[in-house]
Amino acid sequence: MGAQKKRAAAAAAAARVSEDPDDLARQPLQAILLADSFTTKFRPITLERPKVLLPLVNVPMINYTLAWLEAAGVAEVFVFCCAHSKQVIDYLENSEWFSQPNFTVKTIESHNIISAGDALRLIYEQNVIHGDFVLISGDTVSNMSLTQALQEHKERKKKDNNAVMTMIIKKSKPSPITRQSRLGTDELFMAIDPNTKQLLYYEDKADHSKGTICLDKMLLAENPSISLHNDKQDCYIDICSPEVLSLFTDNFDYQHLRRHFVKGLLLDDIMGYKIFTHEIHSSYAARIDNYRSYDIVSKDIIQRWTYPYVPDVKFCGNRATKLERRGICFTAFNSEIEQSRSAQVGSFTVIGYGTKIGSNSKISDSVIGEGCTIGSNVLIEGSYIWDNVIIEDGCELRHVIVCDGVIMKAGAVLKPGVVLSFKVVIGERFVVPAYSKVSLLQQPTVHDSDEELEYADNSSGTVEFSSIQGTADQSNGEMTSESSEAHKPKLGTGGVGYIWSICEGGQEEEWRHSVAPIPEDKLTELSEAMDDDQELVTQDRTALSTSGELISDSNASEGDDNEDSKDDSVYFEKEVEATFLRAVEENVKVDHVILEVNSLRLSYNMTSADCAGAVFYSMMKLAIKTPHSSAIGLLTLYPSPFSMVASNAYPIYLSGELQQNTANIITTWQKLLKSYLLEIDEEIEIILKFEEMCLESAKEFSPLFARILHILYDKDILQEDAILRWADEKEGADESDKVFVRQSEKFIQWLREASEEED
């Protein structure tokens, strides 16, 4: 379509809503929620159930999105349904969402749509959007306030009619090894005007083998200031003006929201439409794009980053659970579960209603759904078990997803990364290989592209693929003889289902996007390849810095990067703390803990000093929260998130008890801490971290600073050079910054004298 026709279409779109900006401001805020991801990343699960209805910490994903939209002040939501539309509509009609005051949810259904672009074109034709709207998919979790972003969008629109969209972004450093974010998405490059926050460049499919990013010379010529980032996460929450819908109607080649629409507008120099960004810092926002992001967002929910959308707080569509606090770790229990006294439920675990747990079973870092039966001597670690699953005695599950109605026979083992779709049966003692996908449905012979529709009969919700003819009896899992014989080799004796083959070249995608941690050998392989690539890349003053910003000769500011990196540091420290506490509870070997911390280090792009500080912090916090008579012991119940009163959360110590606790923990875990103290600088970082804790988060240690410093020296964790350099660096500091140097004067003097005697 020519430029003149485009302008006419845009004018017509504007005429469909009020031309008065004040009238637009008074319009109730609307939202479009896409209940179809138009991708195949969650197959085979999404062949039978729409992605937005998959459980996320035992709550359908779409409930998190709707709960946030309601809280953010949206008055009317249009839920667009395509694949499995009947299931989505039936769920919403029978939920509380259709009866909320001042919050209207309406569904729009189509069976012929194959992309997000097609969906928005259909919504435009129905003329239901009358002003600015929020565009979001039903697999997004957030607790951000929309107030500031909306205000910025409206103010820009008043000054510039071409400002049609505001994209929500968040700081998120990709791993330099895997080139992907913590959510498992590809490294994203953005060019942003640092003054206006206008988005100038967007690339999520960069060619890393070249080691360079190509920018149009005109982009650099027309914009006096550009910040190029590879450390931003696209939250997939957009505030749009009504013109956005008309632009999709005018351009039928716009199918994908980012790959086509966003990049199309950025390259269109005729119409001049602009996209801006709004960066959030302390709030949470993430989209579940693959199995890895499903795992990460689930952990974030359990660790309460998404408050108030957490297991122990009632919001529409969930049942509030009792939260048990162990050290700093949370375990959510429901009152109607049956747990053997010898069963161990570890930290960061959620157990659903009606679930039974047998003797000597161990569950940690996992989510268990409702009505599950878990036998004796079962090991479940880092896994997601949905509703009505039967796991017989002696099974092992590590970092897997198990859908509703699955039966695992005695002694069966699921290797990391396995996905079992609905009602699959795994035979006795059968070992399912790592990253396998198992379904009652045969694998499609034609692989759909990422933009194609999940292939299902939308009128009935049934899938148009061949399935195993024969049903497993829920009491014994047996099938008809013909079917059973046909599938014995696949899943063991009594097994029911097909193991899908991994397509050629797809192995890498499996471990990159899996709920399982990336294997150590893969990280080593990637690290070596990265080192080789680095040698080929020419280093000059316009290369990307570690912060991801384009550095100019005259102006290189690190302020924003330093400020935003605090978010990653907090996440990293909390993850290390959770890993450490699980290791204490489960008696994990130090070498294995080092591997886990190293994996986190690579994921967050942290240094040895960061690791040392986080490990030391975790050890000191454990010392405070552990009663003197027990290694772990303390168990405090919190009925609500606001009842975490300090007097209840921490035991009361005599100074001698806390000192002894600390000494015991340092002795036990000194190998872990020493593994990150490679240089004197790392040791000084430990002392500075301890000072910070004594002043802020762990004031109980303040009177014991000098004594614990001596313990760290005695255990060969801190060398005398590190302690003396720390003291010397405080020489010119303010008196308020010398509190702990003064407290340690006798010890420091003793070290100096000892050093002089040796000389």
Image (spheres, rainbow, N blue to C red):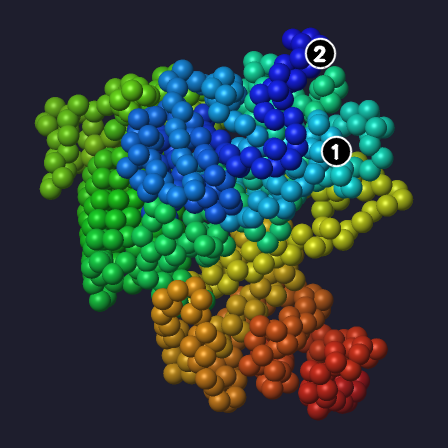
Q: Percent from the top left, x then y, of residue 256?
A: 55, 23
Q: Which residue is mark 2?
A: 3
Q: Amino acid at mark 1?
A: Lys
Image-based side of 100 in relation to 462, left or right: right
Along the line of sight, which residue is nearer the eye, 609 or 130?
Answer: 130
Residues under numbered marks 2 and 1 in contact, where contact means CB atoms less than 8 Å apart: no
| Dot placed on the residue nearer the N-terminal end, 2 or 1 | 2
Q: Secondary structure at mark 2?
A: helix
What amino acid type is highlighted by mark number 2?
Ala
Dot 1 falls on a residue whose secondary structure is helix
Snapshot quadrant of residue 447? top left
Q: Tell me which residue sits at (66%, 32%) in the image.
A: 21
Taking 668 as reference, is 261 left or right?
right
Image coords of residue 476 (percent x, y): 11, 40
User: Which residue is at 40% across, 31% downward?
Assistant: 106
Task: For marks 2 and 1, give the CA distance.
Answer: 22 Å
User: Can residue 360 be seen by looking at this rendering?
Assistant: no
Is residue 306 visible in the rendered image? The answer is yes
The residue to which callout 1 is attached is 159
* 377 lies above or below 545: below
Q: Which mark is residue 172?
A: none
